[in-house]
Image (spheres, rainbow, N blue to C red):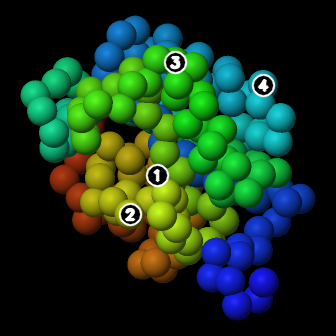
Amino acid sequence: MENDKTFIKYNTAGSRSAIAFGSNIGESLAILEGAIKTLEKTLGITIKAKSSWYRTAPVGGPSQPDYLNGAAILEVQLSPQKLLDTLLNIEQEFGRVRQKHWGPRTLDLDILLFDDLILETPDLQIPHPRMTQRAFVLVPLAEIAPDWIEPVSREPISQLLQKLDCSNVSLSINL
């Protein structure tokens, strides 16, 4: 098993993970708050911090409504893959249908960071591959975890945020 590149060591006693939330279809605020409540009730997950909600312009993809975005810091007793499976199930609970790449969605939940893990599997990449290029991800994450070191760049989230244009991200609702 030591030669198996998919073998990952993680701390089952409690790993820290950052996740991103997004929604631009339906009652986005109610959907996002419902996702938070669902996570709070999920075995193996404790929400340690959650950001405000931010209104953001869509990036890429077809013409679509603005998003509400946010972030949360979780303590998890789950493997990265089990956390991903849990997030995908929650997306489905809230009506997520994957039709167009970067298209509109009722709920999008992404794992951004998992401790200081760097992981690449066919269905999961940690840190999230585009997080350092997206103000709609880094603005809410910097609100709750400005000093978290992104393991690829080895820079804190607050410093990565300073490199981005944040003009399309505005505070919408405080939690």
Secondary element at image label 2 = loop
Secondary element at image label 4 = loop
Q: Is residue 73 visible?
A: no
In the image, residue 45 above or below residue 33: below
* Residue depth check, mark 4 versus mark 1: number of the one nearer the observer: 4
Residue located beneath label 2 in the image? 129
Q: Which mark is residue 41?
A: 4
Question: Which is nearer the N-term, disc 1 or disc 3?
Answer: 3
Question: Which is nearer the N-term, disc 4 or disc 3?
Answer: 4
Question: Which is nearer the N-term, disc 1 or disc 2?
Answer: 2
Q: CA distance from mark 4 to mark 3?
A: 15 Å
Q: As shown in the figure, which amino acid type bears the numbered disc 4?
A: Lys
Residue located beneath label 1 in the image? 142
Residues marked 4 and 3 touching at CB (< 8 Å)? no
Say few, some or many: other residues with alpha carbon within 10 Å of mark 3 (under 14 / 14 to 19 / 20 or more): some
Q: Nearer the viewer, residue 92 or 47?
A: 92
Say few, some or many: other residues with alpha carbon within 10 Å of mark 2 (under 14 / 14 to 19 / 20 or more): few
